Image: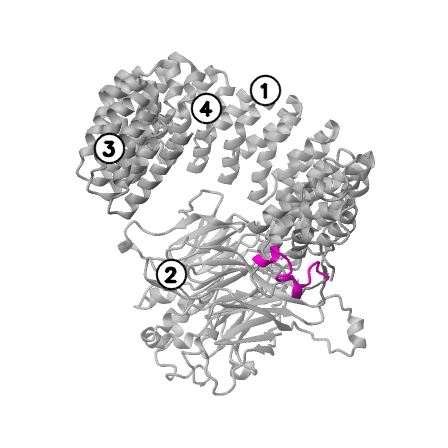
Amino acid sequence: MAMIDEPLYPIAVLIDELKNEDIQLRLNSIRRLSTIARALGEERTRKELIPFLGENNDDDDEVLLAMAEELGVFIPYVGGVEHANVLLPPLETLCTVEETCVRDKAVESLCRIGAQMREQDLVEYFIPLVKRLAAGEWFTARVSSCGLFQIAYPSAPEALKTELRAIYSQLCQDDMPMVRRSAATNLGKFAATVEAPHLKVDIMSMFDDLTQDDQDSVRLLAVEGCAALGKLLEPQDCVAHILPVIVNFSQDKSWRVRYMVANQLYELCEAVGPEPTRSDLVPAYVRLLRDNEAEVRIAAAGKVTKFCRILNPELAIQHILPCVKELSTDSSQHVRSALASVIMGMAPVLGKDPTIEQLLPIFLSLLKDEFPDVRLNIISKLDQVNQVIGIDLLSQSLLPAIVELAEDRHWRVRLAIIEYIPLLASQLGVAFFDDKLGALCMQWLKDKVYSIRDAAANNVKRLAEEFGPDWAMQHIVPQVLDMINNPHYLYRMTILHAISLLAPVMGSDITCSKLLPVVINASKDRVPNIKFNVAKVLQSVIPIVDQSVVEKTIRPCLVELTEDPDVDVRFFATQALESSNQVMMC
Amino acid sequence: MHGGDEVVAAPSRPPEPLDWKFSQVFGERTAGEEVQEVDIISAIEFDKTGDHLATGDRGGRVVLFERTDAKDHGVSRRDLEIMDYPISRHPEFRYKTEFQSHEPEFDYLKSLEIEEKINKIRWCQTANSALFLLSTNDKTIKFWKVQEKKVKKISDMNLDPSKAVGSGSVASSSSSSSPKPCLVNGSSFDGSYNNLSNNFFPPGGLPSLRLPAVTSQETNLVARCRRVYGHAHDYHINSISNNSDGETFISADDLRINLWNLEISSQSFNIVDVKPADMEDLTEVITSAEFHPTHCNMLAYSSSKGSIRLIDLRQSALCDSHTKLFEEPEAPGSRSFFTEIIASISDVKFSKEGRYILSRDYMTLKLWDINMDSGPVATFQVHEYLRPKLCDLYENDSIFDKFECCLSGDGFRVATGSYSNIFRVFGCAPGSTESTTLEASKNPMRRQVQTPTRPSRPLSSITRVVRRGSDTPGVDANGNAFDFTTKLLHLAWHPTENLIACAAANSLYMYYA
C-alpha cells in the first residue's frame, strides 16, 4: 500500500471511491473526474484513467450516465484536441448500453468531442467508430450511430462520404423500429451536412422510405423531418418532393401522424412559398381543423394564429376564419380551450375591421363557454385584442365572465382568475376597475381556501403597484384594514400578510400613519398565531420606516411580545428584536 | 389485415399427429408433499427466441430458465462429439435465476390488500445480452432488467483499508463502525479539494497516486427493477402486452386499457374505457387484451360476454368503437343459466403472423380468422364431459377458472389446459383430426384419449350430442377420476419448436414432440 501524504488524502479517497460499493460514493467520484485527472496529470489520465473507465463499464446506469457526461468535457484533461481520440473508446462502449438516457448522453458527448477534433483524427478515429456502431450486433449500437453522422460526414473524403450515405440508408431500413426511429429523428441534422446534389437524390430516397414505413411511430418522426428538410431544399424541390408527402401525411390513416402534421404544418409554409401554400397547404390545414379526431383538432386549433400570421389576411379570412367559427362551438372542450388560448392573437393579424366583424362574436361566445378553462384562456390574452380594437366592445361581456370565474366553486379556477386581475386592471383602466372589480378583490381575502387568500393578498399588492399609492389609499387600504376585525383569526392573519406586502409599495409615511397602528393593535390579539405574525410583520417593516419610529413604536411592542406566555410568540419577537438591533448598528 | 397465410398454405395432407414425450420438470412434488400457496405458478412465458422461459408465482417471484441444449452458445457440434456429449434433439432448459418481483401491499386509501401474485409476464426486446421483462400483479407493472455482472475484487488502493480509518485528521469524520476503507467524501471534503486549486497539481501529475486495480473472474446475475408503472388501474390488471414498435405496451383491467411508453412510467393514456356512466348498467368486462404481433396499430381484447373486439389505434385517441367484432351467434334453444358464464373468454392469443386469433372460453377453444367475423373457423371441445356438471362447477366457483391457451409457432396446433392436471393439444390445419390429451406428469400419455374428438365441429351440433348423465360423477371420459382442485391454467408453446411448458400447481412440466 502506498503511503499518501496528508494533503493528498482527499484526492486519494476520491480515486479509491471510483470503485466503492456504495453507488453514491462512486457517483460522487465520477462527478469529480476532472479533479482526479488533474491530480494524475495529462499523460497518466490518457494512459491509465481513461482505459480504467473503459474497462469498468458494467456499472449502474446512474454512474454510466454521469461518466458519459463528464467525458464530453474532458479534452483539456487529456492534453488538448490532439489527444481527443483517447476519449472515444469509453464513449463508444457507452453508446451500446441498454439504457436510452446513457446512450443519448454518450452520443451528445461524442458529438461535442468530434466537433473539436482535427480533421485527420476524425477520419482516422471518429469515422471508423461510427461505422462500427452502425454495424453493431445489437440495435442499441445502431440507434446511437444515427446521431453521429452529422459530425463524421463533413470531414470524410469523397469515397467515404458515399459509403456513409449508403450506411445511413441501410439504417433507415433496419429491421428494428427503434433504429429506424433514430434514423428518422436524426435525418434532418445529417441532411444539413450533405451536399445539395446528394441531398436531392440520396437523402430524399431515405426520406421516402421513412415516410412509407408501416410503423406509425416511424412515420410520426418522418413528419418532423419534413420541415427540417424543406428548409434545406430549394423552394421548387421542396414543392416537388416534400409538399406531396406532407399533403399525404395530412390524410394519413393514423390520427397520431395527422396530429404531428397539424403541429408542424405552418413551418413548411415559408419553405414552399406563397403559391403552393395557397393551393395545397391551406386546404390541408383546413382539413386538419375539421378532422374527426379531437386530438388533431386541438393541435390544429393551437396553431391557428401562427398559421394565419404567415398567410395574407384575405386568405386567412376566406379559408381559416370559417373553421375557427366552427371550432368555437366544437363538441370537445379541449379544442375550444386550445382555440381560446391563441385566438386573441389573430386580432393583430386580421386588423381592426375584420376583428370587430368576425372575431368579436367568437370571443364573446368563448367568454360564455361553460368550461372555465376556455374563458380563462380568453381573459389571459386580453391585451392582444386591446391593442387592436380597444376594450370597450368586450367589456360588457367581460364583467359577467370575470364575476362568474371569481365565484367558481373550483378554487383552482378562482386562483387562475386572480392571477389575471392586475392584467385586467391595466387593460380596463381605473374607472372600470373601481366600479366592478374592487369588491371582488376584497371578497377573495375572505375566501375559504388558503391559496386564494394568499393570492388575494399578493393581488392587492400588485394592484397598488399598478395604480399607485394614492389610488390604493382611496380604494384598497381602508377596506383591507377594516377586515382586521374579522372574528376568524385566519382572516385576520391574511390581512397581516397583506399589510406586510403593501407596506413597501405604500412607502414610509402611509406605513407609519395607517398600517403600523393596525399591526401594533393586533399584537394584543388573543390568538398567539396572530401575535407571532405581528412580530414577523414588524420585522419586515423595520427597514422601511424611520429609525425613530422603530425606537418609539416597534421595539416597545416587540419587547412586550418577548414576555408573552406563548413560546412561539417569544421566539419570533426575539428574532425581530435582534434584527432591529442589527439595523441600528449599521 | 393480411397476416400471411400460415394455415391456408398448409400442405394438402394435414401434418401427422405429434407424439408427445416428457422432457423436464422443475419443482416436482414428492409424494405427500403439501403445496405451499405462494409456490403455485401463476404465469408462464417464453421469450421471442425461445431461449428463455419465465414463470411467475403467487408469492410474487419470477423465475427464469435458459435453454441449454446443443443449439447454443458457440460450442460447435464437433466439439460436443469429441466430448462425447449426448446431443439432445429437443430444447432443454435449466434454472437461470429468480427474483422477488412484487411484494404484498396495502392500499390505505381504499383499505384493500394488494396481492403479490404475478398475473402476467411479458418479455421485451433483448439488448447486449441483458434480458428485459415486464411483470404485473393486480395493480402495478414493473420493468425488470436481468444482467450478468462481474464480481469485482478491488486491490491496489491508495489507502490501506485496514489503516485508513483514523489514519489522518480528516479521516476522523468517518464512521469507524463501517468496514469500508474510506469515508464519505461529501460535504466534509468539499472544502478540502476546492483548496486543491488548479495550480496545486504539478503539470506532470502526482506520481504517488494510483488507480485501484479491478480483477474479476466470476459473474453473477443481477435483476434490477428499472421502472414501476403504477396508479393507473382502478380494477385488477388481467393482461399486459408489448407493441411491435418496441417502445409501447398496454395494460388491461376489467374496464379499461391503458397505453404506456416503456421509458415513461409517470403517465399512460387510456385507449379503451368500457365503464358505463352508471355502474348499475355494467354488463360486460374486459377479460384479456393483446397487441397484434406485427401491426403496431391493432389490438384485440376479449370480454366476459364471449366477444373479441379488434381495434385500430390509428382511428381515434380513445377507441370506443371497435373495428371488428368477433362473436358467435347464440345457438337457438341452447340457452341456460350457465350460457353467459361459460361464454366468458379467459384468454386471447394472436397467431405468430397475426392472421388468426385463438380464444379460450370455459368449455371450448375457438380459432378466428381476423378476416372473417361471422364466426370461428374452428371450435375445439376441451372437456365436454363436464357439461352435465356445470352446476357443481358453479357451486364450487370452478366455473370462473381462467384457463390460458396457446398456439404453436407454425400455427398448425393449439393447446389449452383442463382439470386433473391435463392439457389438450388440437390440430387446427384443415383436415386435421389431431386431438391429444396429456397429463402434466412424467408419464403424459397415461390418460390418452383413445377416440379423438372431431375438431372444427360447430358448437351447436355438439350441444345436441351431449346427453345428460352420460358420465358418472367425478370420472372423466376414460373412466378416470378427475379433480377440480388440480387445474392446469397456465401453459406456453415454444415459439419455434414443438415444446410445451405447463404449470401444475408449483411444478413446471415440459413436453416435446
Residue B61 screen position, x and y as percent = 50, 68
Q: Is residue A341 left or right of residue A188?
A: left
Viewer-side label of 4, 2: 4
- For the residues marked 1 and 4, what is the alpha-carbon distance in whole angstroms? 18 Å
Viewer-side label of 3, 2: 3
Viewer-side label of 3, 1: 3
Mark 1 — residue? Answer: A273
Chain of the residue displaying label 4: A
Query: Against B150, is B229 above or below?
Result: above
Q: Are marks 1 and 4 on the same chain?
A: yes
Q: What element carries label 1?
A: loop
Q: Considering depth in this image, is A127 or B35 the residue closer to the camera?
A: A127
Mark 3 — residue? Answer: A520
Instruction: Specify start and end residues of the magenta stretch as a single range.
Output: B156-173
Q: Are marks 3 and 2 on the same chain?
A: no
Chain of the residue displaying label 3: A
Mark 2 — residue? Answer: B304
CB under 8 Å between discs 3 and 2: no
Residue A36 screen position, x and y as percent = 69, 48
Residue B231 screen position, x and y as percent = 41, 54
Chain of the residue displaying label 2: B
Q: Is residue B199 left or right of residue B275?
A: right
